[in-house]
Amino acid sequence: MSAPPATSSAIPIQRVAESRLPDVDLTRVVFGSVYSDHMLSATCRDGAWETPSIGPFRPIALHPATAVFHYAQAIFEGMKAHRTDEGVPVLFRPRQNWKRLNRSARRMVMADVPEELFLDGLRTLVRLDRDWIPPNAHGSLYIRPFLMAVDPYIGVRPSREYQFHIFTAPVGAYYEGSVNLYVTRRWIRAAEGGTGEAKAAGNYSGSYAGMAEASEHGCDNVLWLDSKEHRYIEECGTMNMVFVLGGRVVTPPLGGTILPGITRDSVLRLCREEMGLEVEERPISIEEVVEAHADGVLSECFGVGTAAVVTRVASLVGDGVEVRLPEPTAVQDEIRDRLTTIRLGRRPDPFGWVERLD
């Protein structure tokens, strides 16, 4: 594990008068229902960032004409903090989240967030609210950095003023157990030249219609297909997809329509460099999956992501598809175990992924 570099920056902090933590049972939190005491805030005007500050978690007051309300110029990140067995807070590959946030910002024509602002602000905030991190067996501290356009102007142009915030929330599991995914050719999540590879707010609301259809069919989420042929698997929307076919790990390639998941990258590196598995990043059609299942070649299917971590897919159904995934799940179980034990310091970290906040 690595420690964060020393820094001379000092972020002003206004602490809450009284923490809400005594009223929260961290062993029983539902994902996205409870929020920690503090949040970080910073403003960028005409390309110049003002000094960030940390204060009590609070509502944000905005003008009714604020650009983000009308044109969805907003992006975000998702990441987590955990505790080691000794109680030390740790972050997992935080610099990759900063890099991805700025890739999203450039696609959405927004201001870049400086590395020092993002990483120092993140570390300071997590250290401050470290007591909100649930015990390892019960969850983690979810971290939500986000950037939004705040010009009070309804003309159609990129904003000149942005707000950047980070807040945190103790969370339990996003998915309880395995999931069932719905295959639809009616809706699409992203198209070439669009914003699919950016973590843009509008990508998620645009997927709600498909999610509602999935729910009507008793499924947990959508398995999205490509926008041209409606055949090739892309992602789930909350997870990148991974299949085990004849002992090979196969996942759709990044190409502008799929979010480049940090957990995805970590899983593929573990498979290649630590587990000795053959990994293929290539187009995979829903027809290939159905045929592989019928032939007994498909042994596992799972999703990987910050919230989902490694989640077993129990079935793929809809639009003439009915695939019931078998057990056992040896590959995904080993991946999950390796990710968890590296993150918590129980196994050597050969990649330098984990950052201790002693």
Image (cartoon, helix red, strand yellow):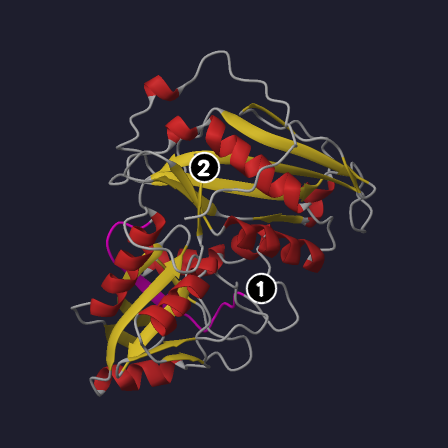
In the rendered image, residue 133 lying in the magenta stretch gets the answer no
Helix, strand or loop for the magenta stretch, by majority = loop
Q: Which residues are magenta?
A: 175-189
Examine the rendered structure and indicate whether residue 291 appears above or below residue 158: below
Q: Secondary structure at mark 1?
A: loop
Cα distance in 3D space between marks 2 and 1: 30 Å
Write down the residue under mark 2: 357
Task: Give the mark nearer the N terminus: 2 vs 1.
Answer: 1
Q: Which residue is at a point 51% across and 75% down the rendered structure image?
A: 226
Q: Secondary structure at mark 2?
A: loop
Examine the rendered structure and indicate whether residue 190 appears above or below residue 57: below
Write down the residue under mark 1: 197
Question: Is 12 positioned to the left or the right of 322 in the image?
Answer: right
Residue 39 appears at what percent x and percent y?
A: 55, 29
Q: Nearer the viewer, mark 2 or mark 1?
A: 2
Bin the neighbour count of mark 2 within 10 Å (Cα to Cα): few under 14, some 14-19, many 20 and up.
some
- Decide which of 354, 308 is in the foreground and name it: 354
What amino acid type is highlighted by mark number 1?
Glu
